[in-house]
Amino acid sequence: MDRILVVGAGGIGGVLTSYLVEQGRRVSCVARRKEIASALRERGPVLRDEHGEREIRGELEVHLEAPASGEFDFVLLATQPDQVEEAARGARHLLAKDGAMVCFQNGLCEERIARIAGGERVLGGIIAFGASAPEPGVYERTSSGGFMLGRLDGRLDDPRLERLATALEAVGPVDLTANLRGARWSKLALNCAISSLGTIAGERLGPLVLHRFARRLALEVMTEAVHVARAEKVRLQKVSGTIDLEWVALTDAERSAPASPSLLAKHALLLAVGARYRRLRSSMLAALERGREPPVDFLNGEVVERARRHGISVPLNEAVVEAVKAIHRRHRSPSMDSLRALFDETRKAAEVRARAA
């Protein structure tokens, strides 16, 4: 049976660890916060899902840092995006000869980890469910869903993909993709809106999308990300098999018209997504609450950086980056008023650009 190391004991890492241990897998985890490590050692993880709350029993080794020695078939990187490169460097020596690191972050982290571990030793895992850690060692699954696994080069004949899929089926359904970049960019566009705007608003997804102005901001943020993906020659792939970001992106007519049947349909889609994932809460917001720097540079900042390379204007994503960083600097606080202020500021800036043109 494959040996698995989970690096990161936040919501996603904790949920992964819980299900894998419950399945009887050989699991070790790295929990860098002492209070989390202590809770996991003394009691084991506590999991809350649709079946209720339960303490997970099984074989689990807990480390404060990556162990000095050992050999693991899979190293599951479940840290925040801004911590993933450090985590990969710290665990690289633990990979078995044909082992693989698996990126579960939002953003485009596989490219970064490939430079550390080598492209042949990196797999990508896109997560389609929500999770949180309300207390040390307590993990709550906030929505259903599974995974999409793949390699940057698109190959599906890697036997590690099937082995990893078999292990992760304990958590949720697993699909394999030959278009990992397209799936990553689609998820990036979605997270640039949902995660970042939820951070600014300080709200879960359900209440967030009830506001029409928030949905409009989300559509415009995603539209900019889609334009950059096209410039990067990425073929976007549907998120969770249903959300087509190419269709979601606003047309020029929809951007200028106050309403249209197609625009109403896009608002309706966001309402449906909000209803399904209503309890989803941004991990970036949790990072801010813990006093950590929010990884917005790996989401909207990634779009901004790549847009500059192609000479593309992305004022909404630029404004979102600045708003999240202002919250981190305590110049703003997360609230619907902050999100409304961002909406009003971007409207005024758009009017100025239109007059100048």
Image (cartoon, helix red, strand yellow):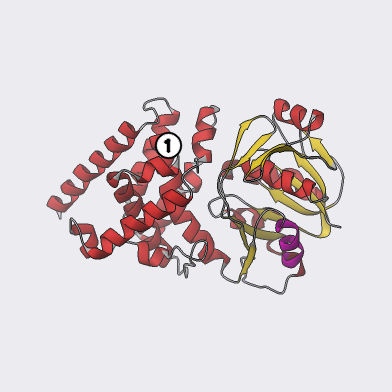
Most common SS among magenta residues: helix
Q: Nearer the viewer, residue 70 or 93?
A: 70
Residue 113 counted in the magenta span:
no
For disc 1, the neighbor class at 10 Å (few under 14, some 14 to 19, many from 20) is many
Q: Splitting the image into 4 quarters, where does residue 56 fall? A: top right
Task: Locate residue 17, reporting x and y percent.
Answer: 73, 45
The quadrant of the image that shows the C terminus is: bottom left
Q: Nearer the viewer, residue 198 or 22?
A: 22
Name the residue at 30% across, 32% down. 337
User: Magenta residues, as a range?
Assistant: 161-169
Q: Nearer the viewer, residue 247 or 143?
A: 143
Q: Would you place residue 114 above or below residue 63 in this image?
A: below
Res. 226 visible in picture:
yes
Res. 315 visible in picture:
no
Name the residue at 85% across, 43% down. 59
Task: Locate residue 184, reporting x and y percent.
Answer: 53, 60
Of the residues shown, which amino acid type is indicated by label 1? Glu
Residue carrying label 1: 203
